């Protein structure tokens, strides 16, 4: 595997007296799936929000493709090759499934909000490209049959797949997933796991926070374990399953 795509360097976040994340460092390489796990309140969300430019770190930096990412505005991340999904889905409920994914293509296409308002000819051309890119993304998550449905009518599991289609439509190098398995039934989580492995084989990289330990063990190449804001372990699923500090941190809790 080649050099690091994402470099998380000594990230720290303090909220008043609380150190939510304390000097955490790790890398994600191209074509790798890395999971961040840890007990409730360990600091996973705070870490994820710093990586995706939603929160400013108290200390430390995030680098992406050899460039410093810290301080980049959230809306510029997609153009750099990073997208993320959210635990509280960000779906436009009154739009169709296809339109929701087409929205994701607009940072790639040349249409600006200004000329889209005026419906210049360039928009029509872009709309066709956007629709075909969006359809490809829907096909890869198995939602092509739902393209004309109103997004708000989809059940939760399918909405999550829709959000993922919108994240992948940009063909991002790195996709950040916030608890992708939460709320999915067995069939949906199986479908999502196969999809992530397929995307990884095509060279995409993923960083995800997840509570579903069986899914983490199945799809992650590497696992970073956080407890009380500190990285206590990092390794393959096999190494993490048998790591004494991880077993201690999860004592009394389920680590399948
Ligand atoms: N905005 C905030 N202000 C003050 N404290 C915060 C804030 N956000 C998080 N914290 C605290 O930081 C710590 C880490 O929280 P965080 O939500 O990152 O953990 P987590 O691992 O994502 O938890 P969970 O698994 O329950 O989602 C907790 O003690 C939390 O109370």
Image (spheres, helix red, strand yellow):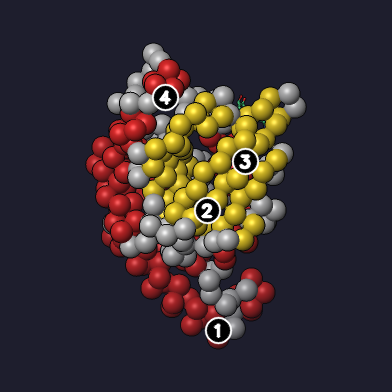
Considering only vertical position in the picture, is 147 above or below 128?
A: above
Q: Secondary structure at mark 1?
A: helix
Q: Quadrant of ligand 1?
A: top right
For the residue pair 105 and 159, the one nearer the viewer reads as 105
Mark 1 lies on residue: 122
At horizontal 39% and vertical 37% (from top left) the residue drawn is 235
Q: CA distance from mark 2 to mark 3?
A: 13 Å
Residue beneath disc 4: 246
The label number, if any, that marks residue 132 in the structure image: none
Name which quarter of the figure residue 78 lies in.
bottom right
Quick check: is the Cβ at mark 2 less than 8 Å away from ligand 1?
A: no
Alpha carbon of mark 3 to alpha carbon of mark 1: how far? 45 Å
Helix, strand or loop status at disc 2: strand
On the image, numbered disc 2 is attached to which residue? 6
Give the residue at the far right of this rendering: 16
Q: Which circle's residue, 3 or 4, is located before the other in the chain?
A: 3
Of 50 and 138, nearer the camera is 50
């Amino acid at each position: 595997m080649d050099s690091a795509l994402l470099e998380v360097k000594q990230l720290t976040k303090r909220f008043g007296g609380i150190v939510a994340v304390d000097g955490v460092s790790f890398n994600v390489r191209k074509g790798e799936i890395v999971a961040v796990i840890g007990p409730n309140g360990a600091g996973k969300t705070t870490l994820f929000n710093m990586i995706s430019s939603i929160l400013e770190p108290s200390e430390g930096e995030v680098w992406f493709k050899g460039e410093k990412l810290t301080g980049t505005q959230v809306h510029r991340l997609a153009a750099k090759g990073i997208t993320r999904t959210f635990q509280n889905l960000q779906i436009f409920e009154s739009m169709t499934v296809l339109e929701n994914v087409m929205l994701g293509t607009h940072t790639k296409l040349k249409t600006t909000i200004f000329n889209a308002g005026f419906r210049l000819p360039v928009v029509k051309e872009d709309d066709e490209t956007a629709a075909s890119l969006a359809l490809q993304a829907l096909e890869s998550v198995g939602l092509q049959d739902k393209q004309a449905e109103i997004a708000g009518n989809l059940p939760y599991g399918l909405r999550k797949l829709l959000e993922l289609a919108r994240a992948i439509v940009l063909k991002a190098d790195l996709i950040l997933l916030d608890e992708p398995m939460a709320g999915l039934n067995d069939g949906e989580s199986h479908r999502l796991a196969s999809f992530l492995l397929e995307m990884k084989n095509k060279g995409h990289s993923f960083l995800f926070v997840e509570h579903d330990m069986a899914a983490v063990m199945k799809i992650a190449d590497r696992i970073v374990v956080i407890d009380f804001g500190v990285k206590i372990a990092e390794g393959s699923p096999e190494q993490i399953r048998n790591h004494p500090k991880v077993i201690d941190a999860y004592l009394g809790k389920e680590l399948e």
